Image: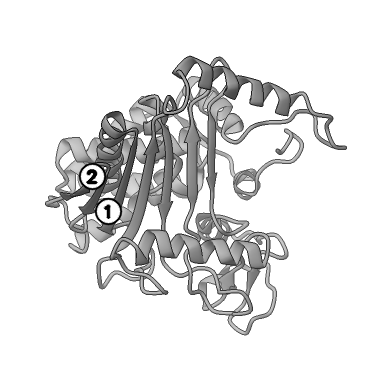
């Protein structure tokens, strides 16, 4: 776990940008208004806005309101369905499949996760596969829904090509984040959200936007040579999986669970939400929800999770670490801070959102005082 002296790469990319602070409720209403103006029903617009702003609150800025202009452009070009007919088909008592009808990923994903939660309440476990979805934002958003319902949640997804298979030099698998959420007792919830790359793809776009390099060892150029220039990645290069061959293998697993199993696009055919405005993405997801009282009383499970966390945090610390954190703990602290102080938006993101506000004749929210 990283100490405060070793910040995640996503924060390093943004750290030199003087931010504008916007209160989360104002930003949430503003973003929802933009999507509603674009033709998305009010309830669905609120869901998309909540997904994006929650990412910003938790410090996952690469999956926050930075994505708004791209999402809106896809809506304007009518390659995302603003009124999807999301069809849920039972398979067995605890299993269902969802056809997202090319709707907004946050809307499709939320509908699928909520159905999985309902299945788990009745059967102890829920398994929901999704096809014909789109970019669904921060993967943790869905397992947080399961935690809120008192459940264990898992979210698998595939994504557009960004990583090579081991030994390759061209994008083929997605960064395909894996999220697992486990409710705690008196201690913090366990919330894992990890992409199959060392660096989230959004950081490459932000680094290019800000004219900043990325760290060595994270990407290759189009000829297969290491690069620190994000523009090389965007011009035919590729990011690299974390952990070498192990990360590459897990990227393949995510494509199997998210794409092959679901009936969605797979094997390098998922559409890129930022560069391909000619067709739907056909992203696939898989959600697993487990009731934590299947094998013992709920209170006993909570106590055992607390014991695990306490034992983890009491372990001897390595040099340079001032604290051992569990997955999701730093994000929870960031959410508390930003809920109080406001969400920092870079000058570039602020300008892009202000441009969208002008197009929609909607007032951009005032900065937090």
Q: Secondary structure at mark 2?
A: helix
Instruction: Look at the image and tell me in which quarter the N terminus lies.
Output: top right
Which residue is rendered at x = 58% and y = 40% of the image? 18
Residue 11: give x, y in percent of width and height: 62, 43
What's the distance in space between the residues labelled 2 and 1, CA to CA?
A: 7 Å
Q: Which residue is mark 2?
A: 35
Q: Is residue 119 above or below residue 105?
A: above
Q: Residue furthest front?
A: 295
Q: Residue furthest right?
A: 319
Depth check: 17 or 331 in front? Answer: 331
The reply to whether discs 2 and 1 touch (Cβ–Cβ < 8 Å) is yes
Label located before the other in sequence (2 or 1): 2
Q: Is residue 343 above or below residue 218?
A: above
Q: Quadrant of residue 160?
A: bottom left
Depth check: 162 or 289 in front? Answer: 289
Using residue 232 as the reference point, say whether residue 105 is left or right of it: left
Using residue 292 as the reference point, say whether residue 232 is left or right of it: right
Q: Can the viewer see residue 131?
A: yes
Residue 74: give x, y in percent of width and height: 26, 60
Which residue is rendered at x = 25% and y = 35% of the image? 46
Q: Quadrant of residue 329?
A: top right
Label disc, if present, on residue 72 of the rendered structure:
1
Depth check: 102 or 244 in front? Answer: 244
Q: Quadrant of residue 140?
A: top left
Residue 2: give x, y in percent of width and height: 71, 38
Using residue 362 as the reference point, say whether residue 300 is left or right of it: right
């Amino acid at each position: 776990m990283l100490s405060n002296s070793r910040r995640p790469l996503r924060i390093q990319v943004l750290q030199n940008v003087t931010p504008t602070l916007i209160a989360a409720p104002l930003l949430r209403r503003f973003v929802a208004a933009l999507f509603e103006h674009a033709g998305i029903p009010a309830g669905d617009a609120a869901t998309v806005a909540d997904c994006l702003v929650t990412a910003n609150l938790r410090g996952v800025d690469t999956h926050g309101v930075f994505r708004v202009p791209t999402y809106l452009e896809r809506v304007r070009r009518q390659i995302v369905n603003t009124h999807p007919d999301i069809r849920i088909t039972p398979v067995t008592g605890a299993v269902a499949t969802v056809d997202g009808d090319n709707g907004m990923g946050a809307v499709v994903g939320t509908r699928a996760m909520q159905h999985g939660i309902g299945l788990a309440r009745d059967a102890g476990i829920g398994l929901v596969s999704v096809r014909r979805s789109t970019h669904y934002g921060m993967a943790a958003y869905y397992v947080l829904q399961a935690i809120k319902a008192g459940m264990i949640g898992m979210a698998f997804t595939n994504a557009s090509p960004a990583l090579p298979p081991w030994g390759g030099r061209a994008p083929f698998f997605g960064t395909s984040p894996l999220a697992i959420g486990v409710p705690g007792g008196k201690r913090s919830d366990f919330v894992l959200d990890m992409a199959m790359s060392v660096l989230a793809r959004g950081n490459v776009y932000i680094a290019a936007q800000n004219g900043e390099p990325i760290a060595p060892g994270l990407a290759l150029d189009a000829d297969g040579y290491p690069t620190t220039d994000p523009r090389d990645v965007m011009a035919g290069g590729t990011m690299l999986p974390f952990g070498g061959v192990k990360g590459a293998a897990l990227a393949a697993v995510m494509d199997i669970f998210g794409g092959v199993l679901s009936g969605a696009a797979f094997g390098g055919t998922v559409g890129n939400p930022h560069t391909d405005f000619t067709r739907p993405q056909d992203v696939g997801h898989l959600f697993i929800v487990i009731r934590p009282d299947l094998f013992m009383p709920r209170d006993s499970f909570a106590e055992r999770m607390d014991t695990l966390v306490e034992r983890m945090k009491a372990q001897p610390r390595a040099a340079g670490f001032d604290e051992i954190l569990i997955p999701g703990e730093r994000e929870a602290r960031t959410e508390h801070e930003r809920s109080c102080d406001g969400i920092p938006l870079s000058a570039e993101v602020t300008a892009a959102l202000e441009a969208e506000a002008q197009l929609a004749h909607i007032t951009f929210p005032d900065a937090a005082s």
